[in-house]
Amino acid sequence: MGFFDRLFSRNEPPQKTTPEVRNYSASVAGSLGALLGGANKVNASNVLESSVVRACVQKVAQTVASLDVDLFKVDGLKQTRLFHPLTRLLKVSPFEGFTAFELWEKLISDSLVYGQGFAFIHRDNTARVIGLEYLDASDASPTTVGEDERPAFLFKELDDVFLLDELFIVRSFRSVSSADLHTDALSLSKAAENFGLSFFENGGNVSGVITTDHSLTEEQFNRLNFAWHSRNHGKQGQHSTAILEHGMKYDRIGTNPEASQLTQVRKYQAEEICRIYGVPPAIIGLDTNVTFSNVEQQGIFFATYTIQPLIRSIEQEITVKLLTEKEAQNIEARFNISSLLRADAKTRGEYFSALIRDGIVTINEAREKLENLNPVEGGDTHFVPVNLAPLDVMREGGTKEKPEQDEQ
């Protein structure tokens, strides 16, 4: 006797019973809840699970962390690089067991994920900065201190409250988490990813319903449900053939990925995420229809409109929080962004050749800017073209006559 024969066997005389009503609302509500929220809901705690978000955050954070930062003394148009005690903290090691690259990477990634990145400022007895200790932004919550309600941040795991003057803070746009601000767009991307995962985990089968003219008891319903899922769902049943008996019919109610335009939705949402974080698609390897020239332009766009505003806010935070009031009057912190704006080798060579020829920079300055080469002897001399003349001379139709010298 087969499964369906056992399922529909009527060895005992049927008895008249009240039709059994099954409540499907709970399961349907649970499925809709998982689809519209729940597993697909994106917030700051799980936003990095998205490969596109992680790539964007990683690219911005590591790009800034790889830039050199120096302190300069500014006197009018003259700028002199300083070997300030703060330079080592910003470029090498801000705290014991921590590199500067790690600190900038964590602070900036926290600002992109949580809205703000924090580091505690360690000072000596003279208020000089001697260290920057990273603090986990996921543990921070805003609060106030004292009767005047000064703004501060509470770090729960540390069980401590820090005033704003004690913290070095890297802020994103309006200090708001992009995951919280754009939760719908990010959740849609995650829902599309989960839909594709569920589809292929079920062997490429879409959902459906089994209908029959017979009335099933609770036991028969559960046995049919268990048998169908165990034989025709998942990897084990993806190539099996179902056989329906006793007038049963299977009707599809789901949508396959092609009909739902899964590929197009995932691509558009990936571009939407790039737009949220200000990262050109080609920078994270998303856009395949790129050429050498437009990739270069996207890199310049990324440096100009994403990296430059971010490092400008960090430079000002360094000036305000890490320098003394007297130092802040003529000392500035600057990230060297020129490496991000470099063109190809041929274009750079032509550019610096023109600068040297016109006397704008010296040979040694060009060597340092171009490829960080060592200076050469005699390379600090400025050169000017000898075939140039002032405009007033050209208006007179030639060169001015030299004054006659008295004969001796």
Image (cartoon, rainbow, N blue to C red):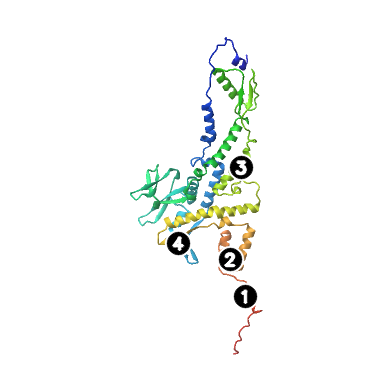
The circle on residue 267 is 3
Task: Identify the residue position indicated by label 4 in the image.
Answer: 331
Nearer the observer, disc 1 or disc 2?
1
Pair 1/4: label in front:
1
How far apart are labels 2 and 3 at the CA level? 48 Å
Q: Nearer the viewer, residue 280 or 86?
A: 280
Secondary structure of residue under mark 1: helix
Task: Say whether disc 1 or disc 2 marks the residue closer to the N-terminus.
Answer: 2
- Residue at label 2? 363
For marks 1 and 4, the one nearer the N-term is 4
Whether residue 261 appears in this view of the structure is yes
Q: Residues within 10 Å of mark 4 (few under 14, many from 20)?
A: many
The image shows residue 181 at horizontal and vertical percentages of 50, 44
Sequence-wise, which precedes: disc 3 or disc 4? 3
Q: Is residue 71 above or below residue 203?
A: below
Q: Amino acid at mark 2?
A: Ile
CB contact under 8 Å: marks 1 and 4: no
Mark 1, residues whose alpha carbon is within 10 Å: few (<14), some, or many (≥20)?
few
Residue type at tag 3: Lys
Distance, label 3 to label 4, CA atoms, is 46 Å
* Badge nearest the viewer, 2 or 3: 3
Of callouts 2 and 3, the N-terminal one: 3
Amino acid type, mark 4? Ile
Label 3 SS? helix
Q: Quadrant of residue 198?
A: top right
Q: Position of residue 167 (x, y in %)?
A: 41, 51
Residue at the spot of label 1:
391
